[in-house]
């Protein structure tokens, strides 16, 4: 089986390859094509993967290319992990938004809208090329903003594009740990949009274990989300929110923390990854994998640091740094489709009426049954009013971003910014758009 990774010079590619190296079953991936526009980054990640493969006789073969059509043509699966304008663009998204006093995070609020506006045209073209050159391939989308990008690509690929995220499975694993149950035995009742979902139940043997968590303050605040949101608020909500909802529930505190930080998250990662890639380029005798793993650990330790600082949640625990995130979701998804290894995964797929307040083609993040025919969303209970209202508001913004990208419409882009729950002024939205367009050449098409 042949896998293509778009954004193959990206920092997280070795996580995917590590998962592939652990798979020795019949029908596994035997060839990986890495595609990237940056040949230097491809070379660096190629070195990391070569070290990972040492001593593994059936390690998937690696080829690299800077030609999109070559990368796609023979693929059975295409992983999309593209970052348009790189971390420089993310740092600009954050800086410009924070200067206006609003959130600039890469998938949430103004920053996510800017990111989507420059990413959707690129990924729409990718979708067209996959549809033409590899019509039987499945596209597994990691590219952020994942829900928005998956929905834009689905106009050309239908249900053969599936968005994935590691946040829901990570949340489920941490809640299971707090409850003292085996995550592999737990069934998650989770629903929403990408980076905007809630865990409403965790079932073991048909019985929901979440109510007993709400009665135990020590257990409820023993994991990342419990410390971020606090026991009182979690009981009020009656669910465990995805960690990204912290940007909504504690927006003022998070914006203040971000504005007071020496560097934004994007600026930190930009400097960190420049150092990593420069180090590998200048030191050919260096262990590429050791350098990568050291950088990865620092990246994980500092994840959402501004949010934890905003509510005095402290440092991340070692259990919160556990691997097995989006790469395991991707591998499980591929196995289910390619080998008919039936499973249940939380994925970003067409709604098909699962969330009644959204139309059937809206991309939602819900549990899905997956087999050789692909994913099928499972029925879930309706979202409560406060959650449904937020989902509808954010989905309307996503639709405006997709339409703005398709039409090249400045007016729709400004409307998306103005209507987002985390942007509080039409005037601010107009200034944000003008600043983003001035700083990011990819947005020049919006008129």
Image: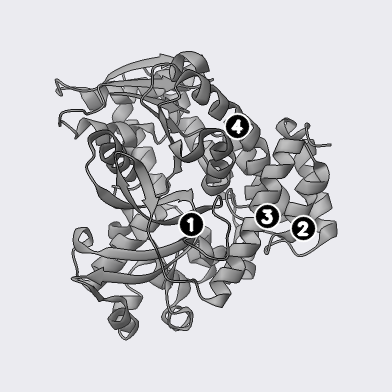
The mark that comes first in sequence, 4 or 3, is 4
> To which residue does mark 3 refer?
397
Of the two numbered discs 1 and 4 in the rendering, the one whose residue sits closer to the viewer: 4
The mark that comes first in sequence, 3 or 2, is 3
- Say what secondary structure mark 4 lies in: helix
Vertical arrangement, residue 224 with respect to residue 360, above or below: below
| Residue 95 can be seen, yes or no | no
Marks 3/2: CA distance?
A: 9 Å
Residue 8, percent from left and from top: 43, 26
Marks 1/4: CA distance?
A: 30 Å
**Cβ atoms under marks 1 and 4 closer than 8 Å:** no
- Say what secondary structure mark 3 lies in: helix
Vertical arrangement, residue 227 with respect to residue 30, above or below: below
The mark that comes first in sequence, 2 or 4, is 4
**Cβ atoms under marks 2 and 4 closer than 8 Å:** no
Residue 380, percent from left and from top: 41, 66
> To which residue does mark 1 refer?
304
Mark on residue 418? 2
Residue at horizontal 78 percent and vertical 32 percent from the top: 444
The mark that comes first in sequence, 1 or 3, is 1
> To which residue does mark 4 refer?
124
Residue 82, percent from left and from top: 52, 32
Of the two numbered discs 3 and 2 in the rendering, the one whose residue sits closer to the viewer: 3
**Cβ atoms under marks 1 and 2 closer than 8 Å:** no
Marks 2/4: CA distance?
A: 24 Å
The mark that comes first in sequence, 1 or 4, is 4
Q: Is residue 84 left or right of residue 419?
A: left
Of the two numbered discs 1 and 3 in the rendering, the one whose residue sits closer to the viewer: 3
Placement of the C terminus among the 4 image quadrants: top right
Vertical arrangement, residue 338 with respect to residue 311, above or below: above
Residue at horizontal 15 percent and vertical 32 percent from the top: 25
Q: Residue furthest bottom?
A: 215
């Amino acid at each position: 089986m042949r896998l293509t990774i778009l954004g193959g010079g990206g920092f997280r590619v070795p996580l995917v390859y590590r998962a592939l190296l652990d798979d020795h079953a019949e029908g596994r991936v035997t060839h990986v094509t890495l595609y990237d526009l940056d040949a230097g980054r491809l070379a660096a990640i190629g070195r990391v993967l070569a070290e990972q493969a040492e001593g593994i006789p059936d390690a998937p073969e690696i080829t690299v290319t800077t030609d999109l059509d070559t990368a796609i043509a023979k693929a059975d699966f295409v992983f999309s992990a593209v970052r348009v304008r790189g971390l420089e663009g993310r740092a600009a998204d954050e800086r410009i938004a924070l200067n206006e006093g609003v959130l600039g995070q890469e998938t949430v609020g103004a920053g996510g809208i800017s990111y989507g506006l420059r990413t959707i045209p690129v990924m729409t073209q990718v979708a067209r090329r996959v549809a033409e050159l590899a019509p039987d391939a499945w596209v597994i989308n990691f590219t952020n903003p994942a829900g928005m990008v998956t929905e834009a690509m689905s106009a050309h690929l239908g249900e053969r594009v599936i968005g994935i995220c590691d946040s829901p499975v990570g949340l489920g694993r941490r809640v299971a740990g707090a409850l003292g149950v085996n995550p592999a035995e737990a069934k998650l009742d989770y629903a929403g949009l990408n980076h905007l979902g809630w865990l409403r139940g965790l079932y073991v043997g048909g019985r929901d274990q979440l109510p007993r968590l709400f009665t135990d303050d020590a257990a409820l605040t023993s994991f990342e989300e419990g410390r971020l949101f606090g026991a009182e608020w979690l009981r009020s909500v009656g669910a465990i929110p995805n960690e990204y909802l912290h940007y909504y529930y504690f927006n003022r505190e998070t914006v203040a923390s971000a504005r007071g930080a020496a560097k934004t998250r994007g600026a930190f990662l930009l400097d960190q990854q420049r150092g990593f890639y420069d180090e590998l380029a200048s030191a050919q005798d260096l262990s590429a994998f050791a350098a990568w793993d050291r950088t990865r650990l620092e990246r994980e330790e500092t994840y959402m640091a501004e949010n934890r600082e905003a509510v005095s949640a402290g440092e991340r625990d070692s259990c919160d740094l556990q691997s097995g995130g989006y790469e395991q979701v991707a591998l499980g998804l591929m196995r289910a489709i390619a080998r008919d290894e039936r499973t249940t995964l939380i994925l970003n797929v067409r709604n098909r009426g699962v969330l009644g307040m959204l139309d059937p083609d809206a991309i939602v993040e819900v549990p899905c049954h997956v087999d050789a025919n692909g994913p099928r969303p499972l029925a879930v209970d309706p979202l409560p009013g406060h959650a449904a209202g937020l989902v509808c508001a954010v989905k309307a913004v996503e639709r405006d971003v997709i339409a703005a990208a398709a039409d090249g419409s400045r007016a729709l882009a400004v409307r998306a910014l103005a209507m987002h729950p985390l942007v509080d002024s039409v005037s601010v939205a107009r200034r944000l758009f003008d600043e983003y367009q001035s700083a990011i050449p990819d947005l020049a098409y919006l008129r």
